[in-house]
Amino acid sequence: MNHEKIIILDFGSQYTQLIARRVRELNIYCEIYPFNKVPLIDENVKAVVLSGSPFSVRDKNCPKVNLEEIKNKIPLLAICYGAQYLAKNFGGEVLPSKIREYGRANLSYVDNSCLLFSEVSKNSQVWMSHGDTISELPNEFDVIASTKDVRVAAYKIKQEKTYAIQFHPEVYHSVDGKQILQNFLVRIAGCKQDWTPTTFVKDTVNNLKKIILNDKVVLGLSGGVDSTVAAVLLHKAIGDKLFCIFVDNGLLRKGEYESVLNQYKGMGLNVKGVDAKNSFLKVLSGITDPEKKRKAIGNKFIDIFDSEAKKIRDVKWLAQGTIYPDVIESISATGGPSATIKSHHNVGGLPDFMNLKIIEPLKSLFKDEVRRIGKSMGIESEILGRHPYPGPGLSIRILGDVTEEKVRILQEVDHIFISSLKKEGLYNSVWQAGAILLPVLSVGVMGDERTYENAVALRAVESTDGMTADWVHLPYEFLANVSNEIINKVKGINRVVYDISSKPPATIEWE
């Protein structure tokens, strides 16, 4: 995309992706790069942001970045570790904090004459998260904000558009964080704030046309938001050269295969359904490890796609609905120092034998951005409002080995839970919901008989992008009714529990 942009250099902070989201919320395009792979700083780059880090600038092997083409040449905003890095490497001193500097704090001093803090009030709440503190600044550095305990909460380098803050403006706990970022990006860097869903669609469609040309593309549809939006984008770009395949892996929700195929009728998409239930259940037989389940499903998915793609003459590309959290949690953010959380069959490439190139039109977007893009293209709200659903389906919601009977049980439980959420008007207030079949047998009493059957866990979370999540406080009466219905109607279940853990530390899925 030939568009003005912000570069975020990632030192491995858990908050780096939040910085990106806040920038995009301001309708400004940004890209994340690892600190050791600084991209070309051309005329499209309006500013650079340095992220936080789990490392200390005092560590011998701490991350170091070459700022030769950045500092004092374009606007630079350094956050937390970035602020300490600049201070230490240009003549200041960074020492271990004498008191804990984590959590909420309030600005006791704000230099409102500084553009960065325009319209930011004294006593504004900010979020601190660092074990070191800047004890001394170089002579050409001016303090522009302080808290009661942190004298150098923010500083500016004289005669430069270089700013640094020790707190995190990207988190919601920093009340004026969005204002600070807007001040830097708009007032200081001069960004136009013209990166909108309409702009993304236009740029992406044009880019897809240039990349794909007259080639044919095959896309795996899931019925979810991501693959649907990817399909519509591709259809806008290449029309009938797009071939969509929806695979029934036997791990879908109850009745989903038929409903998804029906869903796409009238959308102008060329969709073929493939019933592969038995194939997937066969390769999953006896596997209990969640990563091995993902790999087995991924490999079988590739086999099926290879077979189906060969039926389409001269197909060159495999399109996928990969989004940014998939990339972040699969291979670390843009190759940076972040740890891998999980693997995905749709991330990280394809075997050479497929002879297909990958196209991922959504891989730079968060889930909420995908929905906004879809809405701008006129996709029905019923599709856009659908909860995220894991690629490996119910296999990773069945802890232990996967059997046809376990899938049947969990499909029934899930159907009752999701249907009840919709019936009670709770579905749209939940970001993701599902049920997990536990490898736990517990004693129950039904009538005059004792039972020894499975326990199932219900999970409902609220989130914006899946990177963090909190459990939803569903009404007790609702949970009681759902629990009662599951136990009465689903043979094999005699106990229902509700998961009240957040992400982090727990994941949204249990595997």
Image: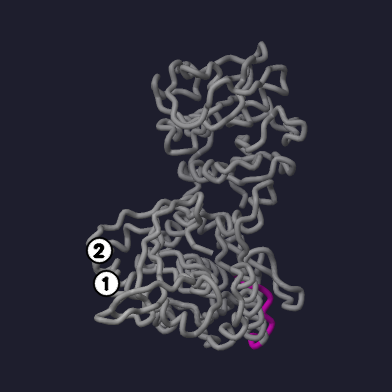
- Image: magenta residue range: 311-319
The residue labelled by disc 2 is 478
Three-letter amino acid code of the residue under disc 2: Phe
Q: Across the whole image, how many numbered discs are drawn on residues? A: 2
Of mark 2 and mark 1, the one earlier in the sequence is 2
Three-letter code, disc 1: Asn
**Residue 380 sits above or below residue 170 on the image:** below
- The part of the image, by quadrant, that contains residue 176 is top left
> Is residue 315 visible to us here?
yes
The answer to whether residue 315 is magenta is: yes
Left or right of residue 241, residue 350 in this image = right
Residue shown at the point (66%, 68%) measured from the top left: 358
**Residue 484, which numbered label?**
1
Q: Secondary structure at mark 1?
A: helix
Which residue corresponds to the image point at 69% horizontal and 29% vertical from the top-left?
A: 57
The residue positioned 44% from the left and 51% from the top of the image is 502
In this rendering, the answer to whether 323 lies above or below 438 is above
Quadrant including the C terminus: bottom right
Q: Position of residue 122 (x, y in %)?
A: 40, 19
